[in-house]
Amino acid sequence: MTLAPSDHTTDVLVIGGGNAGISLAARLRRKGITDIAIVEPKSTHHYRPMLSYVGAGLKTTREMSRAQHRVMPRGVRWIQDRVDGLDPAARSATLSSGERIGYRDVVICPGSTPDWERVPGSAEAMAGPHASTNYTVELAPKTWQLIRGLRRGRALFTIPDGPAPTPQIGQKILYLACDYWQRQGVLEDIEVTLLTPTATVFGQPDVDRRLQPWIERYGITVLTNAHVQSIDADARRLRSTVNGAARDLPFDLLHHSPVHRAPAWIADAGLGIEGAAPGTVGSGPGGDWTGYADVDPETLRHRRVPTAWACGDAAALGTTPSGGGLRHQTKILATNLMATRDGREPTARYDGYTVTPVTVRRGQAIFPEYDRDNELAPSIPRVPLLAPSRALWFFDLEVLPRDYWNVILRGF
Ligand SMILES: Cc1cc2nc3c(=O)[nH]c(=O)nc-3n(C[C@H](O)[C@H](O)[C@H](O)COP(=O)(O)OP(=O)(O)OC[C@H]3O[C@@H](n4cnc5c(N)ncnc54)[C@H](O)[C@@H]3O)c2cc1C
């Protein structure tokens, strides 16, 4: 149901109807909160982990999309608008329409967006014929066109050196592209390079060991401690630093994974982090988290404003943002918010659990789960989650999407 614009107050205001907002609202509803509103401007909801498979030509954007009204939890009001500003002291949000919504608690989950300005030339490169990214719904199909069209030359894949949803997910498309080129018999004519800001290929020792044979199998050059500086789309050159030294790399195909930023109104409301977030673990959340919601990374309650909460890609939680991590975050946030309603302190704690599934070839994947300390945190006992298998491939490609629509978005 879409509300006609009018000033009003709601018990819990959820900003953003992505994975975080929908699953959190559904949980709160099940816990008995009856007056919840979600502000979400888009009419279409996306299962974003499928973007990697769209970029590999294995799924379509249609398969990862549903009408937003179909994922809205029953009994929750959908305000189809955008939050432009928050006033934590007045406990109100201002929408693009000019309407003001009052609230008792606000949950900030608007996600993050690519920061194209951070790497000069990256936006131009995305508009040109040789570069793409799986990080947007519009560009992921182009990734597949570029992979399919390359028969020889140089292919570059980058990993962001700052906050981004599952930053190492660029490795998924790396191996799937190499596997495709190998099957086509052209891999020998393609020089493949991965640029990663981590000190090792993935930044987690057990995962590194599992990926090394695939790096060798495909003949991938791995440049570690690599930071993208600028892209010259016309000259097809990427400027970077590798171990502190300038490195200029030509390309015929570039898959770029951009650093992301949180919406500016979070910082404008005084709710953003100032300076880098704590923790810089290997595969995870290094870089500058300025402007991301400054919540306690364990309780998910704002450090200075007790009526504000955040989870998902817009929150600085000292760990890699992921959909898998969100399932834990929404559970903890809902439990803690309910505790405060009973006058208790929030005691449920998020350990930073996160996951980055990596497909090493078509038909085989690994499922690395780890915590805030970069230690492995397997959630399925006795299943070898780091051994490439068809079962894990099927789980990631087919089972998780169904789980997302039917279970996770319903708040379980
Ligand atoms: C290419 C790619 C591959 C991924 N692969 C995996 C994977 O394999 N496994 C995994 O676990 N995770 C994966 N992820 C990460 C996962 O998709 C995200 O962590 C998750 O979607 C974050 O959910 P969110 O709700 O925080 O943000 P989003 O999904 O971005 O949703 C935010 C919502 O807020 C809305 N919004 C924005 N601004 C406003 C505003 N001002 N007012 C109101 N609403 C607003 C947006 O329209 C959007 O609908 C991947 C992500 C990408 C991009």
Image (cartoon, grey):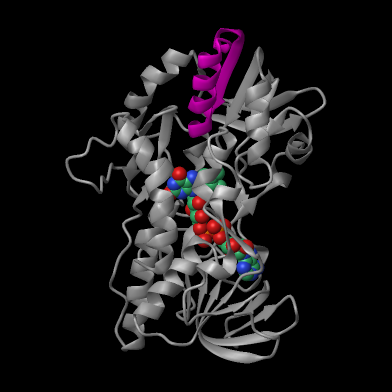
Residue 276 magenta-drawn?
Answer: no
| Closer to us: 112 or 319 | 112
Q: Eyeballing the image, is 50 above or below 58?
A: below
Q: Where does the N terminus fall, quadrant-wise?
A: bottom right
Our reading of the magenta stretch's main secondary structure is: helix
Residue 288, placed above or below residue 146 = below
In the image, farthest residue toward the left: 382
Residue at 54% x, 88% y is: 10
Q: Is residue 369 above or below residue 94?
A: above
Horizontal side of 398 relative to 227 (left or right) equals left
Q: Position of residue 2 (x, y in %)?
A: 63, 80
Q: Is residue 246 left or right of residue 96?
A: left
Indicate the quadrant where residue 342 lies. Answer: bottom left
Q: Nearer the viewer, residue 151 or 377?
A: 151
Residue 18 in percent (x, y) is at 54, 62
**Do we see residue 290 in this rendering?**
yes
Please state the extent of the stretch shown in magenta in the rendering: 171-196
* Residue at the right extreme of this rendering: 234
Residue 180 inside the magenta-drawn segment: yes
Q: Residue at x 60, y 38 (%)?
A: 257
Q: Position of residue 345 (x, y in %)?
A: 31, 80
Ligand 1, by image quadrant, is bottom right
Instruction: Please give the name of the residue rendered at 65% of the width and 16% of the height, measured from the top-left corner.
Output: 154
Indicate the position of residue 152 as horizontal and vertical percent values.
66, 12
